[in-house]
Every structure is written in structure tokens, then in C-alpha cells.
Image: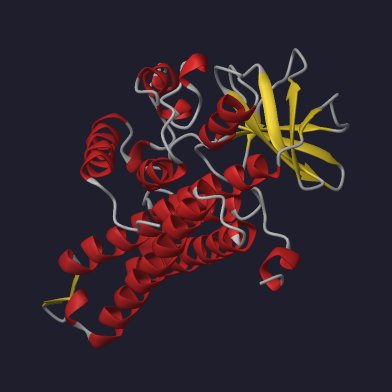
Amino acid sequence: MNLTPDDDQRAFVTATADWCRDTMPLEDARDRPADLWNQLEAMGLPGITAPEANGGLALDHATEVLVFAELGRHLAPVALPASAVAARWTGTRGKTALAVAASDGLRLLDGDAAQHGLGIFDGRIGHFALPAGLVPGHSLDPSATLVRLSAMPLTETVDDPRAALHLQLLAAAFSVGCADAARDMAVDYAKVREQFERPIGSFQAIKHMCADMAVRAAVARSQLYYAACALDAEDADTTFHVAAAKRLADQAALDNGRANIQIHGGIGMTDEAFPHFCLKRAHLLQFVASVDAAALLAA
């Protein structure tokens, strides 16, 4: 198992990062371009691991998670992981809403202009056509809309357990990107915000917080890449490694999001500043393809 990204992977990640920086800066999370999804599809991002016969790129999961971590860093549409899994395992093309089961029905995230929904139900991927006439509302993440369904639609199940692992892996990649974004935002602010005529980043207490954020993001990224390689290699412990990647990534995103707001001080809690974007996305992602404790205890 080679854990070092090759030149092609690094080039793909660099091109994605450059495009994200120009097209969907994090501070514009509430106001994305109207044709954003068309641009994402034109770059092939929802179909990285999908077969070429279905219009995909037929690349491996290791490449895909590196790219999705960059997308997650810019709070890309949360429908992307669901759309990528749908393209890989059901052959569905186009936008697919991300479905999350709830005690009183179903939550559909980022379903604007989507024709299908996809989520994990009883450990397997379920895929269904969206009913007509859905009216999206606000979710806890300002960049994603929400629709509540009181009953489960008629669902087709993907029996291959790797499909559910795939969705967990991509959700973890988004969380890793979210942790990276919070870390970078905190460090940039600590360099320019002054107190006692010195940048606050020169104070040891702030340095330690930033260092902890960097460590959390690095650990989560390492486990994410190992889990992706394990899925590609069909390793016997893949379920455990994907579960560990999801748990570490979710925790890193939450902890870094909170630390970022603390480093920003009072302004970090306001709507006009941007740190809350990362924390709200982190809270949302922990409900997506959540990890079964049995998968972590099975190793």
C-alpha cells in the first residue's frame, strides 16, 4: 500500500484548490454562483471514481479523498458526496441530495435542482427519486438547504457494503477540509490581530491552540488517506479504518471550529465574521453517514 500521493494526484489537488479559491471562496458560502453545480460537473468532480462508461474518471478512492478534502476546505455543496456515491454505485448522473434519517422521517440536504436522494439506511446505501414540489428551507449550515420528509420514499438498496463505506469516506474528507479551513483561518487572524501592540499569535496560549489545531487536522488527514487506500486494496480491516477516519475527522472539524471562534474573540461569534461557517458545517457533517460504534470496537 503506497501512502505517498503521486505526481498526478498532487496535480489534480492543486488544480482543484486553485479553482475552489477562485470560484467558491469560503466567505461567499451563502452566495454561490448560480451555475456552480454545472461547473463542478464540467470538472468531473462528482464522477472521480465512477466508471468511464457512466461518464466518470474511473480513478481510485485515494485520489478522490484528496480532492474532496480540498472541496471541503471551501465548504463545497454537501450534495457532492451523495452525488459521487450515486455515480459510482448506481450509475445515476446529475445532482443527488444527501439524505439523513431522523426519528420523525428524513432530512434532505442540498436538494435544490436534484432529482434523486441518497443516504445510509440500516447500514446500506439507499437511493430514491425525489418527490415533486419540495420546498427547501434553511438548515443549520447556511450553505445548505434542508427539506423535511415525514415518511421514507420508496428506496432501492445497494447491497455492496463498500457503497456505504464510500459515503462515510467522502463525508470524512469534507470534515478534514473543514478542520483545515478553521486552522488556516485562526492562524491568519492570529498573525494580524494585535493586543498589547503585538500580534496575538506571539502569545504562547494562542500558539498552543493553533498547534493543537494543526495536529488534529494532520492526524485526521493521515487516517483518511490510509482508509481510502484500504478501501482501494479491499483490505480486511477497511470498515474499521473508514470508521476511524470518520470519527477523527468529525472530531477535528468540531474542535478546530470551536478553537477558531475562540481565537477570533468576540467577533468570532458574530454573523458578519466567517468562523461560524466552519463550525456549523462541522456540526452538520457529524450527522452524515455517522459511525456505528461496533465498527470501531471490532478491531
Q: Determine the image quadrant of residue 190.
A: bottom left
Q: Quadrant of residue 41?
A: top left
Write the residue at 26% across / 80% down.
Answer: 207
In this rendering, is residue 35 above or below 199?
Answer: above
**Residue 276 can be seen in this image:** no
Q: Residue placed farthest to the bottom in the image?
A: 204
* In the depicted structure, whether residue 146 falls above or below residue 73: above
Q: Quadrant of residue 276?
A: bottom left
**Residue at horizontal 64 percent and vertical 39 percent from the top:** 163
The residue under the point 61% across, 19% down is: 92
Tell me, yes or no, if residue 198 can be seen here.
yes
Q: Is residue 203 above or below residue 254?
A: below
Estimate the x, y position of residue 151 in percent, counting from the top left: 88, 31
The C terminus lies in quadrant: bottom right
Q: Is residue 275 left or right of residue 175?
A: left
Q: Residue at x 56, y 17 (%)?
A: 93
| Residue 65 placement, left or right of 112 | left
Q: How many marks?
A: 0
Q: Position of residue 191 (x, y in %)?
A: 17, 67
Q: How is the image coloured?
A: secondary structure
**Camera-side residue: 234 or 228?**
234
Q: In the image, residue 47 lies at what x, y percent?
A: 47, 26
Q: Nearer the viewer, residue 68 or 136?
A: 68
From the viewer's perspective, tell me whether residue 22 is left or right of residue 50. left
Nearer-the-camera pick, 234 or 150: 234
Q: Is 194 on the left-hand or right-hand side of 183?
A: left
> x, y percentage for residue 138?
62, 36
Front-most of residues 289 and 47: 47
